[in-house]
Image: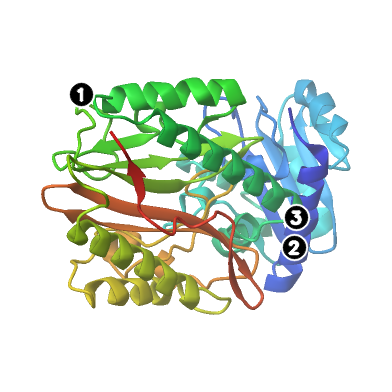
């Protein structure tokens, strides 16, 4: 069910951002959103619509929704959009009339080469919008809403932040239960099935594809990355790594934790395993210290990367961190290297209110993967932990 208080909070924030960025109007243009959903709808509507629809916000505070007759009641019931204009045969008339009344100099629309969350306008809808606006001056006033959406999605409001905190708290409880469940002989699939059962008990969902959420990597032969669990069994003298996120009340967490299973005669993990854990923990701490408003994402990643390689370990082959929120990858700026595959996102500027992951790991030959991931919030003065960082390597005693 939609949360009107949260939608109102985001709509107010969007209007403030239009003023901050000097943009007159923002137009979200959609249809049949059950099939093709613009990610922006999660922020400003949290409903599906069937007919071609337009949602217009302006820097002056206008909140105009133009929807098909049979979608009008649901949109009006939110008490967020006013007026809610219904139509029957064509959206063109009310859309053009509304734009003529508002007369914006620029109209931001939802396309982006860099940010999937800002690229919800399909090519077909882009063509239709240009056709509907042909013969008006507004065709020449369309610009990308990428920067606006990046800020709106990235700067978490108080209600959003509290929901993320609750998701993280539940995830940490799940990790405690996983630790109690682990013992030699358990397979990766059994561990995953246990986590899914506990998720159902908590009334939450996996934050990503349940086939590989959680990601469970047991021992030295387990692949790193987004791999589905297999039949590898927990064994003494090896590592168990779990990457787990949940979606709770519409918001996500994303954490990684690691255990060592003591072998015969061992009272603590081997030195090389402990050394790897300390290196990973210290590299994440270096990223945490570098994370503050005004820095570019790549600078935060570089601080963690230097800390890890400075201890003799290879670079990790991914970004240090990404936004989390309504989705597990929730925004434009990433804390990542300046690689072509990331486009312009590593050059994004970190802002107060952002919520990021910090994640990296190293493989220890003969033992497995040591990987950690924490969730953090950016404050006006730096960063604060949302999760409770794993401070020491957890031990499983056979």
Query: Horizontal placement of 122 versus 84: left or right?
Result: left
Foreground of the two, 198 or 237: 237
Residue corresponding to mark 1? 231
> Residue shown at 48%/70% (left/top)?
288
Query: Horizontal placement of 278 versus 109: left or right?
Result: left
Label of residue 104 in the image: 2
Say above or below: 309 vs 24.
below
User: Based on the displayed image, in which of its 4 quarters is residue 383 positioned?
Assistant: bottom right
**Which is more N-terminal, label 1 or label 2?**
2
Label of residue 158 in the image: 3
> Residue shown at 58%/21% (left/top)?
201
Q: Residues within 10 Å of mark 1 (few under 14, many from 20)?
A: few
Measured in 3D between alpha carbons, the distance from the residue under mark 1 to the one under mark 3, in whole angstroms, is 43 Å
Foreground of the two, 94 or 70: 70
Say above or below: 367 vs 90.
below
Q: Position of residue 97 (x, y in %)?
A: 80, 47
């Amino acid at each position: 069910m939609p949360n009107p208080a949260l939608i109102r909070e985001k709509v107010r924030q969007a209007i403030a951002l239009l003023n901050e960025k000097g943009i007159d109007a923002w137009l979200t243009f959609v249809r049949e959103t059950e099939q093709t959903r613009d990610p922006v709808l999660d922020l400003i509507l949290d409903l599906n619509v069937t007919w071609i629809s337009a949602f217009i916000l302006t820097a002056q505070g206008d909140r105009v929704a133009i929807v098909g007759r049979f979608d009008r009641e649901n949109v009006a019931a939110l008490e967020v959009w006013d007026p809610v204009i219904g139509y029957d045969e064509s959206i063109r008339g009310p859309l053009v009339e509304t734009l003529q009344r508002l007369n914006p100099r620029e109209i931001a629309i939802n396309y982006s080469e860099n940010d999937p969350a800002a690229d919800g306008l399909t090519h077909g809808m882009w063509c239709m919008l240009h056709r509907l606006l042909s013969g008006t001056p507004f065709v020449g006033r369309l610009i990308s809403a990428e920067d606006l959406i990046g800020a709106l999605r990235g700067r978490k409001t108080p209600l959003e932040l509290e929901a993320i905190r609750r998701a993280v708290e539940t995830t940490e409880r799940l990790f405690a239960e996983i630790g109690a469940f682990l013992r030699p002989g358990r397979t990766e699939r059994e561990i995953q099935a246990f986590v899914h059962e506990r998720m159902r008990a908590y009334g939450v969902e996996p934050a990503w594809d349940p086939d590989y959420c959680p990601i469970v990597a047991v021992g030295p032969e387990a692949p790193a990355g987004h791999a589905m669990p297999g039949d590898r069994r927990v064994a003494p003298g090896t590592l168990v790594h779990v990457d787990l996120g949940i979606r709770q009340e519409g918001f996500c967490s994303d954490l990684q934790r690691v255990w060592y299973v003591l072998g015969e005669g061992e009272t603590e993990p081997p030195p090389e395993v402990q050394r790897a854990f300390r290196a990973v923990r210290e590299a994440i701490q270096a990223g945490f210290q570098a994370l503050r408003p005004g820095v570019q994402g790549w600078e935060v990643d570089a601080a963690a990367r230097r800390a890890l390689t400075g201890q003799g370990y290879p670079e990790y082959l991914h970004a240090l961190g990404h936004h989390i929120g309504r989705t597990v990858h929730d925004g434009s700026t990433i804390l990542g290297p300046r690689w072509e595959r990331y486009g312009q996102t590593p050059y994004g500027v970190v802002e107060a209110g952002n919520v990021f992951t910090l994640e990296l790991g190293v493989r220890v030959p003969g033992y497995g993967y040591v990987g950690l991931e924490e969730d953090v919030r950016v404050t006006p003065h730096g960063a604060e932990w949302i999760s409770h960082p794993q401070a020491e390597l957890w031990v499983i005693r056979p």
